[in-house]
Amino acid sequence: MADLVVIAFPSEEKAEEVRQKLLGMQQNYLIELGDAVIAVKHEDGKVKLNQLMNTTATGAVSGGFWGLLIGMLFLVPVVGAAIGAGAGALSGALTDVGINDKFMKEVADVLQPGGAALFLLIRKMTADKVLEDLQGVGGTVLRTSFDHTKEQALRDALAAHHAATGGAPA
């Protein structure tokens, strides 16, 4: 079972910095992420999602490959590739992998304009090491599916930054 964590940051840059830090931890097998999305609230109030993987582009590439392969069997590789790419792009656009996009936009709607939220779907993690590495990054926990003990440990790790800087937000 995966856990959901949503952390708000004052800027997209700060959220991206933390996401990159977590992806580095994933390479060291300290955490296994199912998804890591940044939602940014623009000045006009619209929320934009910055996904790790573009399913439309992935679908188009995959569909193009299979279309080309099938097209070669029927001696029309260009037509097969075009049809496959179009079908793959459509399929990718309709596919929602990981955290539900509508849910992320609803949660991110409470952010201040210019603010960002990092949505994490955590499959596994070595909690003590991950929390130690997250200490000092700042951010505010908006939602989690952790139990109360883990959630408080996360809040404490993020708040440690505020105490070290005299209460100034990250």
Image: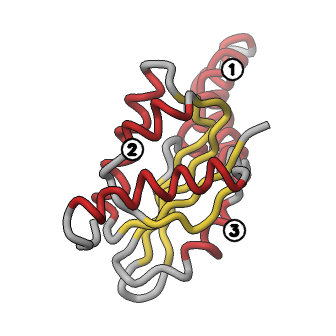
**Type of amino acid under label 3:** Lys
Of callouts 1 and 3, the N-terminal one: 1
Mark 2 touches mark 3? (CB < 8 Å): no
Mark 1 touches mark 3? (CB < 8 Å): no
Q: Which residue is at 46% across, 56% downward?
A: 156
Res. 102 mark: 3
Q: Which residue is at 37% across, 37% downward?
A: 133
**Type of amino acid under label 1:** Gly
Mark 1 touches mark 2? (CB < 8 Å): no
- Does residue 22 sit above or below 117 in this rendering? above
Residue 54 position within the rendered picture, expressed as x and y whole percent measured from the top left: 53, 45
Q: Residues within 10 Å of mark 2 (few under 14, many from 20)?
A: some
Depth order, front residue of 86/166: 166
Q: Quadrant of residue 22?
A: top left
Of callouts 1 and 2, the N-terminal one: 1
For disc 2, the marked residue is: 134
The mark closer to the camera, 1 or 2, is 2
- Does residue 65 sit above or below 106 in this rendering? above
Residue 86 position within the rendered picture, expressed as x and y whole percent measured from the top left: 64, 43
Residue 9 position within the rendered picture, expressed as x and y whole percent measured from the top left: 38, 66
For disc 1, the marked residue is: 71
